[in-house]
C-alpha cells in the first residue's frame, strides 16, 4: 500500500507536487511513498469525477488528495475554498471523507513556485541578464514593488520564458518545486496542503 495517491489536473502540477513530496523535511512530514495520476479532463475532470476515479485506489493508498486549479471555465463556486468544500462534501457522501481531501490552488499552480528566490531566475533561464528578473517584471507591470510575488504569477512566468525563448514544460515546475524554499510560502492552498500532510504523515522522533 502506498502512503499517498494524488489525482491532479495536469502534468505541471504532477511534476511540482511530486517534487515537493520528495522534500519531506521542508514540509515537516516523514518520508512517504507517493503515486500521482493526471486526469485527462484536467480541472473539471478532477472536480466532477474524483469519486469515480478514486474508488480504484481506496484500498491501495493510506490517503488521497485531489489537487486542481481554481481558474477554469465552469468553476462552480466563487472561491477556491468553496470548491474544496463542494468536492469534499461529495467525497464524504461516497464514503471517502477523511481518507481523501481536496486542495484548490488559487488562481493557479504558479502561485506556489514563483517567488523572489534566486532559484526562480536560474530555472527560468534569467541568470546573468540585466535587468534582473524582478526588475524586468516590475517594468512590465507584472510584479508590483514591495510584494512577495506577482499578482499573476502565471503571466509573469510566461512573459519571462518568452523573453529567453525557453518553452514552458513540466520539468520547469519540477525543478522549481525541488529548489525554491517553502518556508515562508503564505499561499492559502499551499498551507492547507502542508497542514493535511502533517496531520496524515507526522515526522517521527
Image (cartoon, helix red, strand yellow):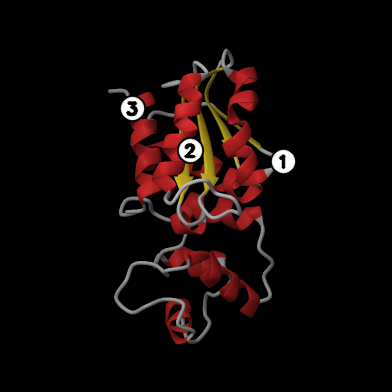
In this view, which residue lies farthest toward the right?
40
Residue at x 61% of width, y 51% of height: 12
**Residue to which mark 3 is pinned:** 199
Image: 182 above or below 159: above
**Residue 112 image offset from top left, x and y in percent:** 45, 54
The N terminus lies in which quarter of the figure?
top right
Of callouts 2 and 1, which one flags the residue occurring earlier in the amino acid sequence?
A: 2
Quadrant of residue 169 within the rendered picture: bottom right
Q: Residues within 10 Å of mark 3 (few under 14, many from 20)?
A: few
**Residue 198 image offset from top left, x and y in percent:** 34, 31
**Residue to which mark 1 is pinned:** 40
Q: Nearer the viewer, residue 171 or 92?
A: 92
| Distance between the alpha carbons at the discs numbered 3 and 2 | 14 Å
Q: Nearer the viewer, residue 119 or 38?
A: 38
Q: Secondary structure at mark 1?
A: loop
Residue 71 lies left or right of residue 134; in this view the side is right
Residue 37 lies left or right of residue 122; in this view the side is right
**Residue to which mark 2 is pinned:** 21
Of callouts 1 and 3, which one flags the residue occurring earlier in the amino acid sequence?
A: 1
Residue at x 61% of width, y 19% of height: 55
| Distance between the alpha carbons at the discs numbered 2 and 1 | 22 Å
Residue 4 can be seen, yes or no? yes
| Mark 1 or 3, closer to the camera | 1
**Residue 155 image offset from top left, x and y in percent:** 54, 70
Amino acid at each position: 500500500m502506498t502512503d499517498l495517491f494524488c489525482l491532479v489536473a495536469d502534468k505541471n502540477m504532477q511534476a511540482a507536487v511530486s517534487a515537493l513530496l520528495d522534500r519531506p523535511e521542508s514540509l515537516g512530514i516523514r518520508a512517504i511513498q507517493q503515486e500521482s495520476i493526471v486526469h485527462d479532463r484536467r480541472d473539471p475532470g478532477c472536480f466532477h469525477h474524483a469519486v469515480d476515479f478514486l474508488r480504484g485506489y481506496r484500498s491501495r493508498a493510506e490517503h488521497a488528495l485531489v489537487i486542481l486549479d481554481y481558474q477554469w471555465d465552469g468553476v462552480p463556486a466563487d472561491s477556491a475554498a468553496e470548491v474544496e468544500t463542494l468536492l469534499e462534501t461529495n467525497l464524504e457522501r461516497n464514503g471517502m471523507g477523511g481518507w481523501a481531501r481536496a486542495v484548490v490552488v488559487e488562481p493557479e499552480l504558479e502561485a506556489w513556485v514563483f517567488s523572489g528566490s534566486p532559484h526562480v531566475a536560474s530555472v527560468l533561464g534569467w541568470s546573468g541578464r540585466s535587468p534582473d528578473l524582478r526588475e524586468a517584471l516590475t517594468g512590465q507591470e507584472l510584479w508590483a514593488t514591495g510584494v512577495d510575488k506577482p499578482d499573476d504569477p502565471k503571466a509573469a512566468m510566461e512573459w519571462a520564458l518568452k523573453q529567453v525563448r525557453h518553452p514552458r514544460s513540466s520539468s520547469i515546475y519540477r525543478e522549481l518545486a525541488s529548489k525554491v524554499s517553502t518556508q515562508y510560502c503564505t499561499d492559502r492552498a499551499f498551507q492547507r496542503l502542508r497542514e493535511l500532510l502533517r496531520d496524515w504523515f507526522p515526522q517521527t522522533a
